[in-house]
Image: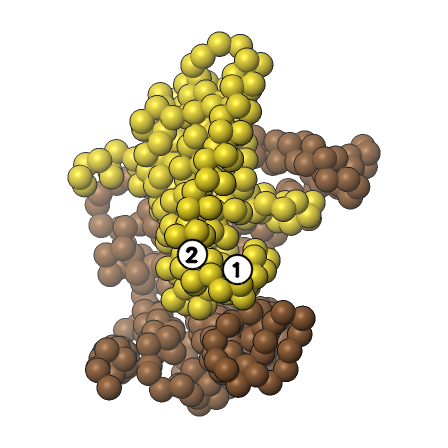
Chain colours: A yellow, B brown
Amino acid sequence: MLEKIKNNFNTQTWVLIPIAIAINIAVGQIVLLLKLPVFLDSIGTVLVAVLCGPWAGALTGALSNVIWGIAIDPGALPWWPVAAMIGYMAGRMAQWGFFKSWWKVVVTGFVVALTAAIVSTPIAVYLFGGITASGSSFITAYLLQTGTGIWQAVVSTSFLTEPVDKITTAMLAFAIIQGLPKRTIGGYPKAEQATVEGGASKNQLYIAVGVVVVLVLFAAFMLRNILGG
Amino acid sequence: MHERLSFYVKRNSVIHDLNPLTKVILTLALILIAFTSPWYWTPHLLVLVAIIPLSFIGKVAPEFFRTAIRIILPAAGFLFLMQAFFQPVGDTVIFKFYFLDVTQESLMFAFRNATRVIVMVSAFTFMLLTTHPSELMSDLTRRGLPGQFAYVIISTLQILPQMQAKAQTIISAQRSRGLDTESSFLKRMGSLSPLIGPLVFGSLAEVEERAIAIEARGFTSKKVKTSLHEIPDHSSDKIIRWGLVILVILSIALNLWPS
C-alpha cells in the first residue's frame, strides 16, 4: 500500500503539483471571466492524476481547495474532500486504461462526476443544510420547495450540474496531454497511462459524441429513478 | 517581480511571538468549536469575544477588518440570503416571496450557518495575518512534516500570483488580436482554448527544469536538514495548545451527549 502511494511521487511530481494547483485556480478564473456555465477548476488535478497516479491526484485536489480557500474564496475550503476524490478517481480510471482515447476520456469524466456528486452531498447537507452559496443551489431550492427530500434534492442537483463540467475537464486535460511533447511526459511516474491509442482522431470524436449522448440518457434515467423513488 | 502571495503583516505582538503550531491549533480549535458546540450562540460569541479581540491583541485589526469587509462579509451574506430564502424548515412564516417562504426557523438557521462560515474564514485570516508561511512550514518540517509538503505549499503561494499575471497577459494579448471574450456563448466557449492553451503549455514546460534545479539542491535527500532560523517554542505555547485541545474535546463531547 505505502509502496503504491510512494511510486506516485518522484521529484517531477512534487514540482508538477504546485503548478497544477496554480493551473486549477488560474483556469477557474479565466472561465469565470468568460462567464461559462462550468467551473473547470480541476484540470490541473486531472493532469497530475493521469501523469503521476491517484494518490498524487488526490493530494493536488485537496491542497488546491485549501489554497483556493485561503487565498481567494473562503467558500472553497470545506469542499476539499470532493477535490481529493476527483483526483483519486481520475487517477484510478487512468490506471484502468480509461485515458487513452476520446470516448474513454468521456467515460472517465462521467465517473469522476458521479464520484464528485456522491462525495459533495453529505458536505452540502450537513454543513449547509443543502443550500450552498453556489448558483446551482437554485435547483436544489426549487426541488426542496416542491417537497423532494433533502438528500434526493442535493444529489440530483449534482447529477445535473457535475457531468458537463467534469467531462469537459477530462477532455481538456486529454487534449493538453496529447499536445505535450513525448519528452516532457516521459519523466512522470505513470507516463505510459497517457499514451494514445485508437484510429483517426476524427472518428474517435464521433464515437465520443455518441458516448456523451448515451451518458446523458443514462443520467436522465437515473435522475427520474432518484426523484421518483 | 510579483510578491509572494501572503497576507502576513510584520508587527511586534504577543500573537506574533507565539509558535506557529499554536496558532494553527488555535484556528482549528475555533472552527471545530463553532461547528460542534450544541449551544446556538457559540459561533456568534466566538467572533465577538475571541477573534475580534485577538486581532486587536495581535495588532492586525485594520488589516483584519479590511479583509472581513472585502471578502468574508460578502461571502457570508450571500450564504445567509440563500439559506434564509431556500431553507424549507419551520412554520412561522415571516413573509412570502413568490414560491419561497422566509420562516423564523430558516432565518435562525441561516444566521448560525453564516456566522459559522465567518468564524471559519476569519480564524484562518487571523492566522495568516500573524504567521509567516515559511516560518510555519519550517516549524512543521522540524516536527516531522515531510519537506516535500512544505515545498508544495510555499511554491504554490509563489507560483500562483505569477500564473495569474501570466493569465492576465495572455487574455490581453489574445483580446488585442481580436479574440472574442464577450459575445455569444459558442464564441466564448471557442475562445477557451486560445486562452488556456498558452497558459498551461507554458507552465508545464518549466517542470523539468525546476525538477533538475531542486534535485541539485538535495530535495530528495533523506538526511536531516538544519535550519538557519530558530523558531521559539515556549512552555506557555504547550499549555495553550493542550488547553485548546481539551476545549475542543469538551465541545464535541457535549454535542454527542444525548440530551
Question: SS class of the residue under badge 2?
Answer: helix
User: Looking at the picture, how far across and down is residue B111, in whole percent?
Assistant: 51, 80
The answer for how far apart the CA atoms under marks 2 and 1 are is: 9 Å
User: Looking at the picture, how far across and down is residue B174, in whole percent?
Assistant: 75, 35
User: Looking at the picture, how far across and down is residue A185, in whole percent?
Assistant: 43, 24
The residue under the point 53% across, 63% down is A146
Tag shown at residue B223: none
Kindly identify the amino acid type of the residue bearing the numbered disc 2.
Gln
Task: Examine the rendered structure and indicate whether residue A77 appears above or below residue B41.
Answer: above
The residue under the point 53% across, 85% down is B92
**What is the number of callouts on the image?**
2
> Residue pushed farthest front?
A228
Question: Which quadrant holds the N terminus of chain A?
Answer: top left
Q: Which residue is mark 1?
A: A143
Residue A89 in sight from this viewpoint: yes
User: Looking at the picture, how far across and down is residue A24, in whole percent?
Assistant: 52, 44
Left or right for B122, reference A118:
right
Q: Is mark 2 in CB contact (under 8 Å) with mark 1?
A: yes
Q: Which residue is mark 2?
A: A152
| Viewer-closest of B97 and A179 | B97
Q: Earlier in the sequence, mark 2 or mark 1?
A: 1
The local crowd at label 1, few if under 14, some if 14 to 19, many if 20 or more residues have their Cα within 10 Å, is some
| Viewer-closest of B139 and A124 | A124
The residue under the point 32% across, 34% down is A92
The local crowd at label 2, few if under 14, some if 14 to 19, many if 20 or more residues have their Cα within 10 Å, is some
